Image (cartoon, rainbow, N blue to C red):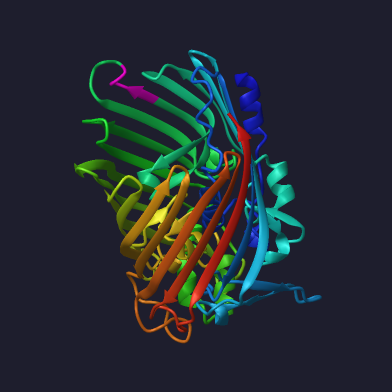
Amino acid sequence: MLLVLLLLLCCMSASPALAQGTPATEPTAAELAKDSAISSLGAETTRDDSSSPGSKLLYDLRLRTAATAIGNDPETLLGYDVIQRPLLGPLIYWHTPELLRPRAPRAYPSVMVSASAEWEVTDYLLLRGLIDTGEMRDGATLEPAVHGFTMNGSPGAHELESLAVVRELSATLGKPAVNLEVGRFRATLADGLVYDDFGSGARVGVDFQELKVAPLRVDLTASTVGQRVKNVESNPMLVLRAQYDPSLLDSVGFFVAGARDHNGALSDVLRSSMAERVLDSPERLHALFSEDLGHGQLGYAGIDGQFVLAKALLLRAAAVVSGGQFTLQAANLQNPLLNDQLDVKVRAAAADAELHYGLGRHLDLAGYGFVLSGGSPPTGNGDTYHAFIGLAPYWVWTGLFFSGGLNQSLLANRAAAAGIHGHGVAGLGPGLELRDGNNMLELRAIWLQALAAPPAAPIGGTGNSYGLEVDLRGQWNAWRWLGVGLELDVLIPGTYFPEATLAYRALSVLSVAYGN
């Protein structure tokens, strides 16, 4: 069984194509955030609590169909066209005049299919598997457009051939007190501030509470950063975390983590940031992006936890500091056959807090606050970059700014720098949630602020305010197996943008599921 598991994992491979002008096969932060928005609206539609507690095999089959309408959202991705010229070679036309300007309204349907299973083979062996297509949609609705159908923003054939749809396939050996998990599994670091994704590797856990020693659990995780097994050598990540549980509802965790970048997947975040300084020079943009060579390392240390402060008052919080260094290669402007080397240091921090107060059995009042450091683009060799970089983050405080894809680099990447193009982001605001079983209605309003000035005019605006976003989400379960979700997000743009056109996103989801 384990041999089959490892053979399947070793079959997963893909080749990056972003440098050649086609979408990357690795799902980007924006695409996975969109997936999370659809998944969250259908996550609880068919939960069946009537299954036998002694069941050895649990499974869940799920189909979600969604319709999305979005418009006037500021353009944050640097688009480009490749024009083939006989004898003269290709010419790249960069869409810099469109940056931070309102995008045209658009609408598209999409489908997501998932199948998960968990099998307790023996008391010492647990197998888990998850196949998830992500958001499937017509490639013509993507920017840039892709021929045929896509999955996670990439050509569907690439996703299927690489077995990227196999998100989880793992075996856990041992007991709750001491266990080892190997294969592909989901890992989370700092409640998603740094990392929340599926990767390949191994995880060892020791629960001293189960051993009757102390209310303490220690986990050591060695995994990939990215959804391809080839990243085991290119982008390994090591995480050590200890969690202390003084009571049933209180917990505090401490962690240290490190990741290495050998293929440029992480350092490309810095490359995108540095491009902001040369937006007025197509030649220098081409020189910067004509190479995808880069390497470096990034380390994290922090604390997370939750605490019951008073009756019906719960606090969840996390804080992280990070540091590292990346080396980039870019073509020399005078001699394209030569490369210039750029060394950039990273010093950054992030914090997130949620305060929940129960107003009654079904009503919850919340307060949200978060700060992710940012800064102006590095000026050159030896500079220090202060934008917080998430390896594969899960930032979903608001629907349009985060899940809608505004928070991203100039070129799409799974790793992400905080804020638009790494300019940082701080947010603060209230939320109100009404819940009855699996039915819910939530209203959230968050003020969003950049921590560094926007690009100079005519691209950027006059201030640091991203604006105010108001989100309304609802979910209704008609039956145990059928549910409907609706979401409306509205962003009132601030002074960071050159135009103050109201942006919106409407999302409807129909979810059908079967399982035990």
Q: Residue at x 54, y 58 (%)?
A: 486
Quadrant location, the N terminus = top right
As drawn, 109 above or below 493:
above
**Percent x, y for residue 396?**
44, 55
As drawn, 390 above or below 241:
below
- Given residues 505 and 256, the one toward you in this image is 505
Q: Which residues are magenta?
A: 205-210
**Percent x, y for residue 31?**
57, 56
**Residue 362 appears left or right of 503:** left
Outermost right residue: 86
**Residue 91 appears left or right of 358:** right
**Percent x, y for residue 444?**
38, 61
As drawn, 147 above or below 241:
below
Outermost bottom residue: 458
Magenta region includes residue 207: yes
Q: Determine if residue 283 is in view.
A: yes
Q: Quadrant of residue 139?
A: bottom right
Outermost left residue: 310
Quadrant location, the C terminus = top right
Q: Determine if residue 115 is in view.
A: no
Q: Quadrant of residue 217?
A: top left
Task: Say how many tags the image has.
Answer: 0
Q: Residue at x 80, y 75 (%)?
A: 87
- Given residues 82 and 404, the one toward you in this image is 404
Q: Residue at x 45, y 62 (%)?
A: 472
Magenta region includes residue 512: no
- Given residues 435 and 501, the one toward you in this image is 435
**Percent x, y for residue 372?**
34, 59
